[in-house]
Structures are given as structure tokens and as C-alpha cells.
Amino acid sequence: MIAKNVKKVDLAVSMIASQRPSLRERLRTIPWWLVAIFGLALLTTWAVTTQPAYASAFNYIKAGLSVTLVTTLVSFAISTLAGLFLGLARVSNNLFWNNVSTFYVEVIRGIPMLVLIFFIALVLIPGVTLGLKNLAPVFQSAGLIGIASSLQELQTSAMPMNIRAIIALSITYSAFLAEIFRAGIQSVDRGQMEAARSQGMTYPQAMHYIILPQALRNVLPALGNDFISLLKDSSLVSILAVRDITQVARLYAGSTFEYNTTYTTLAVMYLTMTILLSFLVKFIERRMNSNAKP
């Protein structure tokens, strides 16, 4: 009897041991890329807190962090709204708006971002300002003296480069986000629009209450990725002398010749922000997916 019980215990122990993953399997499930990034962050933190060169570079560069974050957030908010309207126009049956939005998206996406930033900030905005000034006599002849005088006082040099950079990034990314929204709207089954219309909803009502909530859930990962991309691409505004962290780092490296410490610190700062945003996007995506389950 005792021997039989011992055999049963041995059998149970062997079954538990067979179900337990091996050391090799456990090692394969560890996100080593995350461990490496965490180690890099710890190494950089140690360097910043203990090495005077890295500490000096970080303290100087962080002065431009607020400009980088504000530029990214404002540009993404504007481009999201513009991209949503453009995406709706892209799937519209209205021939005029469909062609206008398609033309806009194809032109913007066909030009390199660096060229677009130069063009919008140094050509388009001054051109629009000059065009508005030329309209001043028209308003003056119509008796609108106040508007005419305001237009005559417009000066291109009065617009800060920070505002031009935000406008350039907003125009550029609105085209990319338009395609994301278009794909999200078209990913929703067409039968839902037909069912909503059959229940007496107008097209705007069906789009607002039925289609867009599902489309936004579908495109959330892509929106998060574009926000991270915009954060990285905001470094391009340094070519307009906007004092973001990239421009501040360039100035610091040029004055101290500490290129290694300066650009290593800058790279890790961008990496830290993008990794944190990636985790935030994944967290929001999981929460939305869990709430969507019945």
C-alpha cells in the first residue's frame, strides 16, 4: 500500500515537472530587447549623475525639452483633426471633396518632409502673408477699414519660427493621418452603414454614431505609431533654428566640441521618450480591446 502511494506521488511530481517550462524556454520568453534598453537607460543615468561631461550636456539640452513636447503635441492635435476631415472627404461620394482631399494627400506624401518644412516655412507662409496684404485694398474699398488696416500691417517676419514649424508639421502629418483614417473607415463593414441608414439615420449620423467609433478603435495603434514618429520628426524643425532639444544639442556641441557626450545624451533622451510612449500606446490599446469584449 505504501509503495503504491509512493508511486502515485512520484507520478504526480513527474507530471508537474513535465508541465513546468524548462530554463531554455523561460529564457526565450524574456524580452531581451527591453532588458537591453533598460540597461542602456541605467548606464546613461549613471553617466549623467556621476560624469560631469554627461551631466553638463544633459542639463543644457533639457532646456529645449518643453519646446519639443509642445511642438509635438500641438502639431499632432491639429494634424489629427485635419486628417480626420481629409479622411472623411476621401471616402465621401462628393466628387469635389474627394478629388481635393486626394490631391492634397498625394502632393504632401510625394515630397520629402525636410523639403516640405523648408517650403511651408519659407515659401508658403510668406506667400500667404503677401496675398493677404494684397487683399487690403479690396476690403478698404468695401468700407471694412479695420480689416484692411490689419491686413496691411501683416509682416512675415512677425511670425515666430516655432509657429511655422508647427504649421509645417501639421500640414505634413495631416496627409499621413488622412490615409490612416480612410483605411480605418473602410475597414468597417459596409453593411453597418446600410443598416444605420435603413433605421432612418442620415449619413452624418451613421458616420458619427456607428462607423467612426469602430474606425477609431481600429486605427488606434497606427495613430500611436504616428505620434511617436512625429515626436522623432520634430527634430527636423531644428533646421529652422527652433530651440528644441536637437537644436540646443547642436549649439552645445558646437561650443564645447563634446560631440560624443552631447549626441549620446540626445539619442538616449529621444529613445526614452519613444519607449515610454510605446508602452502607453500598448496599454491604451489593451484597455480598449478589453472593454470591447462582451
Image: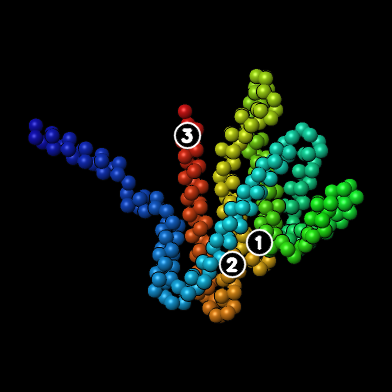
Looking at the picture, tell me which residue is in the foreground, 146 or 201.
146
User: Which quarter of the image is occupied by the N terminus?
Assistant: top left
Looking at the picture, tell me which residue is in the foreground, 188 or 46.
46
In this view, the residue farthest toward the left is 2
126 lies left or right of 37? right
Q: CA distance from mark 2 to mark 1?
A: 14 Å
Residue 45, above or below 176: below
Residue shown at 40%/71% (left/top)? Answer: 49
Say whether residue 135 is visible: no
10 lies left or right of 45? left
| Circles 3 and 1 in contact, beta carbons < 8 Å | no
Residue 101 rendering spot, x and y as whole percentages = 76, 43
Residue 157 rendering spot, x and y as whole percentages = 75, 65
Residue marked by disc 1: 162
Tell me which corner region of the image, top left, top right, bottom left or bottom right, holds residue 70.
Answer: bottom right
Residue shown at 45%/57% (left/top)? Answer: 33
Residue marked by disc 3: 291
Q: Which mark is residue 72?
A: none
- For mark 3, does the 10 Å Cα neighbourhood hold few (<14), some (14 to 19), or many (20 or more) residues? few
Residue marked by disc 2: 246
Q: Amino acid at mark 2?
A: Thr
Q: Earlier in the sequence, mark 3 or mark 2?
A: 2
Residue shown at 25%/41% (left/top)? Answer: 16
